[in-house]
Amino acid sequence: MIGVFDSGYGGLTVLRALLRSLPDRSFLYFGDHALAPYGNRSAEDIYDLTTAAVERLFGLGCRLVVVACNTAAATSLRRLQQQWLPDRHPERRVLGVLVPVVEAITGVSWMAAAPLRRNGGGERTVAVFATRQTVLSNAYPVEIGKRAPEVRVVQQACPALVDLIEAGGTDHSIRAAVEGYVAELMRRLPGGRPDAAVLGCTHYPLIAELFVEALPPGVDVLSQPDLVARSLAAYLSRHPDLDSCDKVPQAHFLTSGDPAQVSRRSTAFLGRHVRFRGASG
Ligand code: DGL
């Protein structure tokens, strides 16, 4: 059974892709809805919440956990993998959601698949929309810069979006917020436009079409859930000891929030019936 963790609903976008590409696996999802959003909290707070969530999923039998939250992964994953994990659970593994996206942006196959549309200046530009803490961590520019220093990364924090999505905001309020953030980013690219956009928060694929509509036509909006699913499938084939296929694969859902409300919204988001149980303690 593979653990999947997010602060709230966002990780469901990743889980949906994982269920599609790994139909023989069982998953246990934990959404920390009671404490979402994480994106405006301090990095230290996010680290503590993330280790507690991973510990919970390990305690329930997962040997591998996907932190399906950019904010948690960007602020905490390196420290968690390098210090906490070797000390507490050396035989288990925790993966994030940034590296598959960074590899897709900088990898040869992506560059071959996406003919370069240059911004006049000859650079390739990638826009990253994310929470405040993901932007502050600089994880996307740093990781992209290590592999492809010629790629220009322009980040845009969208501090209101996760709250609006978690609270079930109206289409109108969310659309207005997305248009505002895209306009802010475009003002920092005078005369140009990004070649590609990363929705660097797992909540945002729930409203991906609003980003597509607000961005200039032709901007390639990358699908983080699909990239993560592909990368996890490859990882599992290299590490068969971490999880096995199930004859009757199942998906279980836990929340620190109100299970009835979370189940209702998740069912609407995923388009399939989802029943969350309360995570006590
Ligand atoms: N889905 C989380 C992410 O990918 C949302 C963070 C939050 O709770 O603010 O960043």
Image (spheres, grey):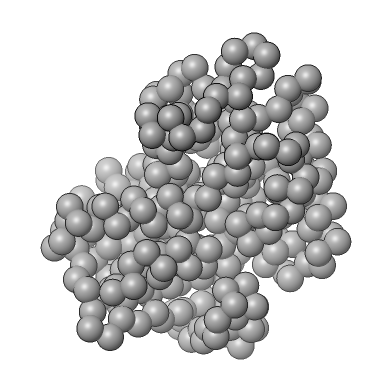
Q: Quadrant of the N terminus?
A: bottom left
Residue shown at the point (58%, 68%) measured from the top left: 9
Q: Observer-nearest residue: 150 or 45?
A: 150
Residue shown at the point (53%, 28%) measured from the top left: 115
Q: Residue furthest top?
A: 121
Residue shown at the point (35%, 43%) measured from the top left: 79
Q: Residue furthest left?
A: 241
Q: Observer-nearest residue: 59 or 135?
A: 135
Residue 56 in view of the camera: no
- Displayed quadrant of residue 188: top right
Residue 64 in view of the camera: yes
Q: Observer-nearest residue: 138 or 13?
A: 13
Left or right, residue 233 beside residue 184: left
Residue shown at the point (74%, 62%) measured from the top left: 164
Where 244 falls versus 180 (above or below)?
Answer: below
Where 181 falls versus 86 (above or below)?
Answer: above
Left or right, residue 109 beside residue 129: left
- Residue 110: give x, y in percent of width and height: 44, 35
